[in-house]
Amino acid sequence: MTEPKLSIVDLTKRYAADLDPAVDRLNMEVEEGHLVALLGPSGCGKTTTLRMVAGLMDPTAGSIVVDGKEITHTPVNKRGMGMVFQSYALFPHMNVEQNVAFGLEMRQVTKAEQKARVAAALDMVQLGHLGKRQTKELSGGQQQRIALARALVVEPTLLLLDEPLSNLDAKLRETMRTEIRAIQQRTRATTLFVTHDQDEALDMADRIAVMNGGLIEQFGSPTEVYERPRTHFVANFIGQANFLAARVGAETGRANLAGESHYKVEVDGLGQFGAIGSTGLSGSSHELVIRPHRLNVSLHPGAAQAPLAGTIERVSYTGDALAVAVRIGDQQLHAQMLTSSGDLPRIGDAAYLSWAADDAYLLPAAAQPVRLAA
Amino acid sequence: MSSANASSAKIFKPRFNPAKPAFGVLVFLLYLFLLAPLLIVFVVSFASNQYLSFPPEGLTLKWYEMLPQESTFMEGMKVSLIVAVIVTLIVLVLGVPAALALDRFEFRAKAAVQSFFLSPLLIPSIVLALGMVLLFGPLELNNTYAGIIIGHVAITIPFVIRTTLMSLATTDTSCEAAARILGADSWTVFRRVTLPIIQPGVIAGGVIAFIVSFDEAVISLFVAESGLPTLPVQVLRYVENSADAAVAALSVILILISLAVVVVVERVMGLRKALR
Ligand SMILES: Nc1ncnc2c1ncn2[C@@H]1O[C@H](COP(=O)(O)OP(=O)(O)OP(=O)(O)O)[C@@H](O)[C@H]1O
Ligand SMILES: [Mg+2]
């Protein structure tokens, strides 16, 4: 494997001796050209991690290595990073061109070259015509693009983005996320992207680092963290999930080339099912994760083999989809069905659930106290 | 779009609000109350009355013509201008970094330092002045520029710290972080980013410091009455000895100087903003 662009080793930050660490021995390797999303709930240490990489904050322990060189204690202005802040942080007393040129000026680039590179950067974010504007006279989305141009024009070693989309309205957020991703792929800038929005992370990232309480719970591609969550937290945070406590029985065969196996599992009150998981889980208790849209819901028995019968407890209609909560014994399962022009199911109606063995995934971590549903 | 706006404007036309003219009258009376002394001084400075009194018996410019010959006024003006200029410079050089430190750093005894810097606003200046005379005696600072300047710095620094802190409170510290990441060292960040952003507060503080120092009478009187009288001290002395309207004319000139400072600063700032 080639050398990673960025490696973070046992990075720790304690704001005060009597507080729990905000970032706790965090490890991560980022490949050149990748966009990595730091995803997690509020307060999990995303911003703290990013600021330590930027050099705005000293780590309590651990090291940061970029291109094979340790930069843990390199001053922030010598790191050559580019950063976009949540508030954009454009210099209010400079116009757009002066803002974008600032980093080049600091690098003592000649005036002529500055001019050319600023123009190219502004064209890249499609705002070439606004060079003379004051930053106050720009919309949120335009400020965002200028901030991106200002960070990228210096060809930074790493591009760091701290919730850059959170101040934009929902529509613009979607446009900007496509655009930022396109620009990132074109420039091949290795990027750390902080967000607490799972859709953003799934849509944009090459790799997602799911953070919780100062730790990375899982680091993997979007499909890995969604389809193969390592922990209850990851399964719960990314997308929706039904959790069932299961006793794992015999392995019934090899499931795929990734070394996963099929199992027979037993769920209290529901019966026996097929499930998939990593090898060697037989004989212990694990949580079964089933995504709501992978549950087949039918209003008539007999559509599937050996369905589970239950009653509909809640219906939520969103136009193209219908989310239902189905009570079976003492479990409540969340499922999704497509709407049709016919009658909608009503609360109290009977519903029949089934799922494919490949869609019931056993969490590799030993079961935590059972929580029923997301 | 625009037609929709126009019609909605018609529908929601504000009704007559009786509170508005009442408020206007109130504001007018308030201004009259505040400005009445100034107006009287202005009128008296053109009055031909032999002694300071109101109303005027006739009009004259003789008090203004007297001013240049009154050497005590000219001397006092020189001292006051020198003091005010130096005080303003010192107070900016000390006050702006102090405000930055108070705003940006967490340290023990921060609250104590903050109240120390702002305390001269709360202590009666006569108390300060007395303390300074006693302190300056053994240091041989009485009747020197250094003495007056130290005294004035002490009473004007709170203004600069205040106004600068106010500007800092509304600035986004990410701007400074952004500049550092883009390669600027601490001094460059201060010069190119922080200072331009807090400039309005710094300038306001400087103007206030200049005017307060230029006007200050109590400390100047205690510290340097005999040796280095400032203009306000000379005015006091003059009023003690003679009762003509020359001081009124001088007051008008002083008001005009203060106004000029404010207007020039406003102009320069305004111009610079327009040029950007
Ligand atoms: N300056 C500080 N002093 C003390 N504690 C801090 C400081 N900054 C952050 N923390 C704490 O450190 C933890 C991590 O904060 P951080 O800002 O990194 O979270 P985050 O993941 O970026 O959250 P958010 O999504 O809300 O921005 C939080 O518990 C926070 O309260
Ligand atoms: Mg944050």
Image (cartoon, coloured by chain):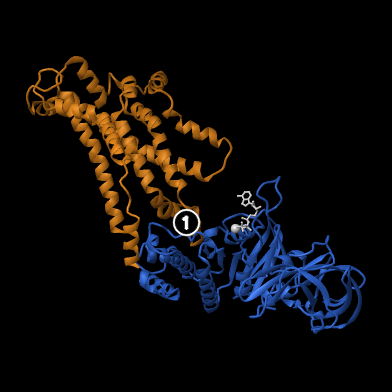
Chain colours: A blue, B orange
Residue A227's spot in the image, x, y percent? Answer: 73, 75
Q: Quadrant of ligand 2?
A: bottom right
Reply above or below: A32 against A194.
below
- Looking at the figure, which quarter contains the C terminus of chain A? bottom right
Characterize the local packing of mark 1: few (<14), some (14-19) or many (20 or more) Cα atoms within 10 angstroms: many
Q: Is residue B157 left or right of residue A336?
A: left
Residue B88's spot in the image, x, y percent? Answer: 34, 37
Between A302 and A282, the residue placed more toward the observer is: A302
Residue B217's spot in the image, x, y percent? Answer: 30, 24
Which image quarter: residue A270? bottom right
Residue B30's spot in the image, x, y percent? Answer: 29, 32
Tell me, yes or no, if residue A67 can be seen here.
no
Residue at left offset 47%, top offset 56%: B175
Reply above or below: A89 against B126.
below
Query: Callout 1: helix, strand or loop?
Result: helix
Reply above or below: A25 against B149.
below
Between A159 and B37, the residue placed more toward the observer is: B37
- Looking at the figure, which quarter contains the N terminus of chain A? bottom right
Residue at left offset 52%, top offset 79%: A186
**Tag 1: amino acid:** Cys
